[in-house]
Amino acid sequence: MNAPAPLTAEQIREYDEKGFVTLAPSFSPEELSALRMAADDLLRNSGPLVRGNPRLQLEQEERDGEPVIRKIEPVIDLVPAFEQLVYDPRMTAAASQLFGEEAILFEDKVNYKPALVGTAYPLHQDYAYWSEYTDRLISVVLHLDDATVDNGCLRMMPGRHKEGLLPRPDGETRIIAKDVEDPSIAEDVTDAAGSVVLFRCYTPHHSFPNRSAHGRRAILYTYNPASEGDTYPLYKGQHTRTCLDWLATQA
């Protein structure tokens, strides 16, 4: 494993101005293959494929009459490879550089954006979900597959993070817009497998559906500065316990 190079002044400027920045791939084909296998193992190890499973978010549309997983969280308690990845410098070094101190884990999940049935994700800002915690939060996305327009890549609204939480429709506490029809509202973040994207918790983002024959798997870890405290045991740790307690009732 090569130590990641520090962010350049231009990359830092881009992150500050746009609210996100993409880093070139630094994971080998062998490492990516192992992580893809881990993501597939997670599908099998996360409990029954039913809508009541608290670890799973399922797609609205089924495939051949069977539910399809959209997202799994948390993940590091189930898959050692994902636990080992949390503090891999290729995931943390850029966030630590931006924080000016050690980055520690706040949230962990894997998005699958499955082929053919992967639905659109509404326009939102992550901090609307996390407002009881610090807003010094950076999400780090590792693409396990190529992210393309066809398979519903992430789409970011450059510069809008500077406005804080944006207005939401009446009755919505988190979602800015459920349906985004104007493609010019955001920028496609198309990247090769192995690329890493960092974005701020105020950066508005969404995605269009995946109607291609290829899924778009991605690992998402969100970090906060060590000086803000370790809230993972309280936040995601409680979710983990809920998942395990639920699973015990299915035995």
Image (spheres, rainbow, N blue to C red):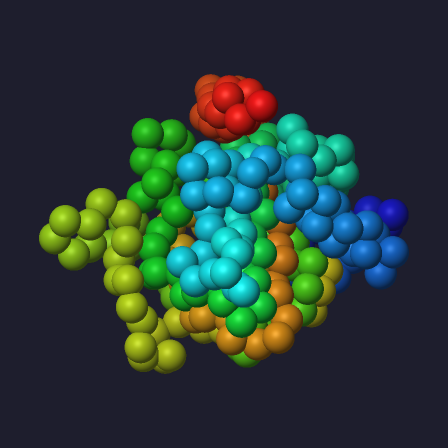
In the rendering, at what x and y percent does residue 145 appear? 68, 64
| In front of the other: 119 or 228 | 119
In the rendering, at what x and y percent does residue 172 appear? 20, 50
Q: Quadrant of residue 104?
A: top right
| In front of the other: 154 or 113 | 113
- Is residue 220 in sight in this rendering? no
Q: Is residue 6 above or below residue 239?
A: below
| Residue plotted at (16% across, 56% down) | 169
| Residue plotted at (67% across, 43% down) | 44
Taking the image as shown, residue 167 lies to the left or right of residue 83, namely left
Q: On the rendered image, what quadrant is the C terminus found in?
A: top right
Q: Quadrant of residue 205?
A: bottom left
| In front of the other: 24 or 207 | 207
In the rendering, at what x and y percent does residue 115 appear? 58, 68
Q: Residue reaching furthest left? A: 170
Q: Is residue 43 above or below residue 28?
A: above
In the rendering, at what x and y percent does residue 231 appear? 49, 23
Taking the image as shown, residue 215 lies to the left or right of residue 129, namely right
| Residue plotted at (74% across, 54% down) | 36
- Is residue 78 in sight in this rendering? yes
| Residue plotted at (34% across, 74% down) | 185
